[in-house]
Image: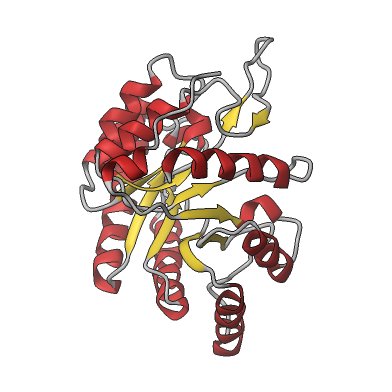
Amino acid sequence: MFPPPLALGAERGFAMKLSVSTWAYYDKSREEALERIAALGVEGVEIIAHAPCFHVDVNFTDEQIGYVKGLLAAHHLEISAISPATEFLVFTEEEMKAQLDHMKRVADLCLRLGANHARIFAGGRLPEGRSTKECLDAVIYGLQETAKIAESAGIKVSVENHGQFGGVYELFKPAMDAVPTLGITLHTNRLARMPNYLDYVREFAPRVMHTHLNDSAPVTAEGERPRPVALGEGTLDVPAILKILQEAGYSGYYNIEYGAGQEDPTPLIERSLAYLRAHLA
């Protein structure tokens, strides 16, 4: 564990905005997910638009869109991001076209819901039999086309350092360098396995548009999956990460994400929000 940070927000005249992802309540209805998140007293919500929960969906009718907007208004929640599943590690014209058509529908969903930001994935597992160059070429093309879609729609798009592709610096770095208009969603738990993760944060901080803030306990056995813990209770130097983001001028939501397959994540979220409120207010 690390010492708590200074009250960076007050120090820099920063208006803190907190958000929670509905991924924490993947097994709940959108009504219950939004109700639970609103009860946490946050300003924003990241809404999942992919399996298994589809709290919003690109196929929604106008009536369904109006219903969700009504729920958000009733709970006084703003959308910090719409979060679809995208996969640009594809190698046929038909597959790439399907992904880009989906991205166009995601942009349209954002506009219909009054959101200005989508969080996407670059690619997941690296396919066998494909070279690094082939993988990079496919992802870069998909992201470049996505940047055009975002510009046309007037929305922001950030790419998460997620998945086998997004989690490898040697792949993520050149892909992001090729699309300077796209931002980054910083998933902090993904940093825990990096030996020099603060250098990673410093390098990408100017492009961070969104966050998936979470922490994990130390790994005690080789191959063990890190156990999620609240911010400030795990292996990450959270004060240093927050300071780097602040010094880079980060002005987005401080979005908490604890995910599927865990016990009720509400206690982790509550403690994480308390940590942020204490040290960023």
Q: What's the colour scheme? A: secondary structure
Q: Can you give x and y, in whole percent of width and height, for residue 5 in the image?
A: 42, 29
Seen from the viewer's position, the closer of residues 182 and 24 is 24
Seen from the viewer's position, the closer of residues 277 and 160 is 277
Seen from the viewer's position, the closer of residues 248 and 261 is 248
Q: Can you give x and y, in whole percent of width and height, for residue 132 in the image?
A: 35, 29
Q: How many labels sit on residues?
A: 0
What quarter of the picture does the N terminus occupy?
Answer: top right
Q: Can you give x and y, in whole percent of width and height, for residue 123 in the image?
A: 45, 43
| Outermost residue, bottom side | 63
Question: Can residue 175 be seen from the camera position used here?
Answer: no
- In screen coordinates, is 88 left or right of 146? right
The residue lying at 63 percent from left, 66 percent from top is 55
| Outermost residue, top side | 221
Q: Can you give x and y, in whole percent of width and height, for residue 11 in the image?
A: 30, 40
Seen from the viewer's position, the closer of residues 41 and 122 is 41
Determine the image quadrant of residue 198.
Answer: top left
- In screen coordinates, is 129 left or right of 274? left
Question: Can residue 253 be seen from the camera position used here?
Answer: yes
- In screen coordinates, is 46 left or right of 206? right
Relative to 68, is 269 above or below? above
Relative to 156, is 141 above or below? above
The residue lying at 51 percent from left, 55 percent from top is 19
Determine the image quadrant of residue 178.
Answer: top left
| Outermost residue, right side | 263
The residue lying at 66 percent from left, 50 percent from top is 24
